Image (cartoon, helix red, strand yellow):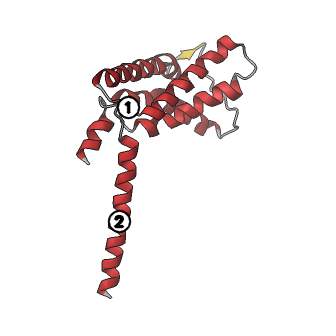
Amino acid sequence: MHFGVLWDVLALLSKFKKMIEIIKQILNSDLGNSFNNAALLVFRVLLAIELFRVHGMKKFRVENGQKEHVPNPLHLPEKLNGLVATFSDTIIPFFIILGLGTRLAVLPTIGVTAIGYFVVHRNDSLEVRDVPYMYTLSLLLLLALGAGTYSLDYYLLNLI
């Protein structure tokens, strides 16, 4: 009976080790030299500031007595749709600036911007479609590269 408990503890530790390895893979991001990592830091910060300044601040502004209308092409419940859009444009930029959970953090915003490009603006001019297209590409770059060494991700990785 004691061997069963010991076996369960060892199995749990094995799963914990695998989970730590997955977390390390998600957080690991080093572009090879300090110049590249600094360039990625500047890119991250400027992208996140612009996302928050232009799109996040709209969520708080009231124009003509009404808040911004958030398109809902997937027909989600209105509160959920608004929550995802607001979270993507107001909270996620701070995660991007800090480099905290960057690869996971950008996923909801990639979803919002890609839906904006492929669904909401599919019949609009290239000038209109350009904005969600560029945000989607920029966020996909962060998904692929991670936050770099000048980030909380890198700091936390070195603590583990």
The amino acid type found where label 2 is placed reads Ser
Q: Which residue is mark 2?
A: 14
Query: Residue 16 sits in which quadrant?
Result: bottom left
Between residue 107 and residue 52, name the one nearer to us. Answer: 107
Residue at horizontal 35 percent and vertical 47 percent from the top: 24
The amino acid type found where label 1 is placed reads Ala
In percent of width and height, residue 65 lies at 59, 16
Secondary structure of residue under mark 2: helix
Label drawn at residue 18: none
In percent of width and height, residue 155 lies at 26, 37
Between residue 11 and residue 86, name the one nearer to us. Answer: 11
* Mark 1 burial class by Cα count in 10 Å: few <14, some 14-19, many 20+: many
**Distance (Cα) linking label 2 and label 1:** 28 Å
Query: Residue 142 sits in which quadrant?
Result: top left
Residue at horizontal 38 percent and vertical 58 percent from the top: 18
Above or below, 13 against 84 in this view is below
Between residue 23 and residue 69, name the one nearer to us. Answer: 23
122 horizontally vs 54: left or right? right
Say if residue 129 shows up in the picture.
Answer: yes
Q: Which residue is mark 1?
A: 147
Residue at horizontal 38 percent and vertical 31 percent from the top: 147
